[in-house]
Amino acid sequence: MKTRVLAIAVGIGVMASVPVLAAPHSVPTAPKDYLAMKSPLKETADVVEKGQQIYERKCKKCHGTKGDGKGNSAGGMEFPPSAFNAPGFLKGKQDGQLYFTTEKGSPDTDMDAFGPGSEAGLAKDDIWSVIAYIRKAFSK
Ligand code: HEC
């Protein structure tokens, strides 16, 4: 009997000492009207280059030069920046979903809103050009 009580006590002790793992955060799903959106821009070299410039100024510090989510500021975040270069990641995301998260951000994470009216204040075309760059540079 005594050993059993001890075993239970030890069991509870072990469970209590296991750190609670943070549940992975899921990015909010874009509403239907966003998911239906298509880029109004042609994917020309100019558009991709403009997207690259924006990426380097506004996104790289978190999402990384290689789009692997390991930018210089990415350490220590509760929810890590998405790795765009993970196999199949970009294929699995509709343009309108990428647009929505970039415009509105992901609440309660370090992913801020970048769209019109935000601090970064990217115009719609800026967002579409950065998406064109992300797809071109990081799709796997
Ligand atoms: C301060 C760090 C930071 C910066 C700067 C940043 N992001 Fe993010 N981003 C994040 C984090 C963290 C997440 C993951 C959010 C979550 O888990 O909900 C994320 C997620 C995303 C997603 C969602 C991908 C998915 O999983 O569906 C997109 C799209 C995105 N970022 C685009 C951008 C773009 C474009 C820029 C630049 C204009 C940018 N981010 C700049 C931190 C950042």
Image (tube, rainbow, N blue to C red):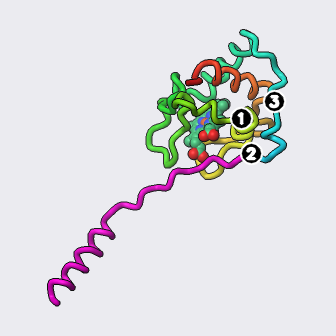
Spot occupied by residue 62 in the image (x, y as percentages of width and height): 54, 33
Quarter of the image with the N terminus is bottom left
The earlier-in-sequence mark between 1 and 2 is 2
Whole-percent x, y for residue 111 in the image: 62, 41
| Left or right relative to 134: residue 82 | left
Three-letter code, disc 1 = Gln
- Residue 40, percent from left and from top: 84, 24
Give the number of callouts: 3
Which image quadrant is residue 126 in? top right
Secondary element under disc 2, as helix, strand or loop, is: loop
Q: Secondary structure at mark 3?
A: loop
Q: Quarter for ligand 1?
A: top right
Asked whether the beta carbons under mark 1 and mark 2 sit within 8 Å of each other, the answer is yes
Mark 2 residue crowding within 10 angstroms, few (<14) / some (14–19) / many (20+)? some
CA separation in Å, label 3 and label 1: 9 Å
Residue denoted by label 3: 38
Dot 3 or dot 1, earlier in sequence: 3
The residue located at (51%, 42%) in the rendering is: 80
Q: Secondary structure at mark 1?
A: loop
Could you tell whether 38 is left or right of 66 in the image? Answer: right
> What is the number of the mark on residue 30?
2
> Is residue 12 in the magenta section?
yes
Identify residue type, mark 3: Lys
